């Protein structure tokens, strides 16, 4: 009995260590990460796709951080956000599990066997995609009622919250 309890506790401990983590700040590899594309006329679209355990706020912060990083890489001091969009994608999965798949309907109706019908499970996965249309600039701000950010200030404010792959110890 004690051995069984020890094995159960060890299994639970290992499962806790293998819990999913929010997306890290890294280039888009397969399902999560950041990406940018040039739209022309000095505009760029910056995106961050999170995984199912990444919050909406984290996805938006990482997109804003990438916009600031891109601005610095292009040699500009500030950037204007012309358009901001955060999309929520939810996938619902319904499954039925039959604990006794080899016992046909005859055995399920027998009073001595009990009823062994299937069990239904439903799971939901939500991910967020944050997109910004930005215009890096130095000097006079572009016209058009847009939000203006200083790239260095954004990076200083968000750097403590940014988790990169090399920061995570396995």
Image: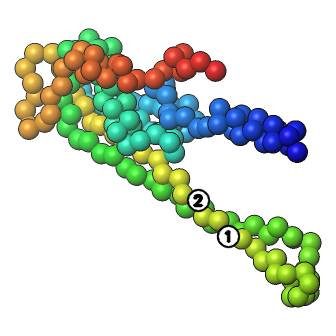
- Note whether 111 is above or below 66 in the view shown: below
Give the labeled residue for mark 1: 120
- Residue 131 is at least partly visible in this image: yes
User: Would you call the spot at circle 2 few (<14 residues within 10 Å), some (14-19), or many (20 or more)?
Assistant: few
Q: For the residue labelled by badge 2, is the local secondary structure a helix, a strand or a loop?
A: strand
- Residue 74 is at least partly visible in this image: no
User: Would you call the spot at circle 1 few (<14 residues within 10 Å), some (14-19), or many (20 or more)?
Assistant: few
Give the labeled residue for mark 2: 123
Instruction: Please report the residue visible at 82 percent of the width from the left and 67 percent of the height from the top.
Output: 99
- Note whether 17 is above or below 85 in the view shown: above
Q: Position of residue 165 (x, y in %)?
A: 53, 21
Seen in the image, is 127 located left or right of residue 109? left
Instruction: Please report the residue visible at 24 percent of the width from the left and 15 percent of the height from the top.
Output: 152
* Numbered label attached to residue 152: none
Q: Mark 1–mark 2 contact, CB under 8 Å?
A: no
Seen in the image, is 2 located left or right of residue 70? right
Q: Position of residue 37 (x, y in %)?
A: 38, 31
Which picture quadrant has residue 4? top right
Seen in the image, is 21 located left or right of residue 119? left
Q: For the residue labelled by badge 1, is the local secondary structure a helix, a strand or a loop?
A: strand
**Quadrant (top left/top right/bottom left/bottom right) for the C terminus:** top right
Which picture quadrant has residue 157? top left
């Amino acid at each position: 009995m004690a051995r069984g309890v020890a094995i159960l506790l060890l299994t639970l401990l290992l499962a806790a260590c293998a819990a999913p983590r929010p997306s890290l700040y890294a280039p888009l590899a397969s399902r999560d990460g950041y990406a940018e594309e040039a739209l022309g006329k000095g505009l760029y679209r910056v995106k961050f796709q999170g995984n199912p355990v990444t919050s909406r706020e984290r996805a938006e912060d990482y997109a804003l951080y990438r916009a600031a990083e891109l601005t610095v890489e292009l040699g500009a001091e500030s950037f204007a956000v012309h358009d901001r969009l955060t999309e929520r994608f939810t996938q619902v999965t319904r499954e039925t599990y039959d604990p006794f798949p080899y016992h046909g309907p005859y055995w399920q109706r027998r009073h001595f066997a009990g009823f062994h019908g299937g069990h239904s499970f439903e799971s939901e996965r939500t991910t967020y995609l944050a997109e910004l249309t930005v215009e890096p600039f130095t000097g006079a701000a572009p016209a058009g009622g847009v939000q203006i950010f200083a790239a260095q200030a954004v990076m200083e404010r968000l750097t403590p919250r940014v988790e990169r792959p090399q920061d995570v110890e396995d």
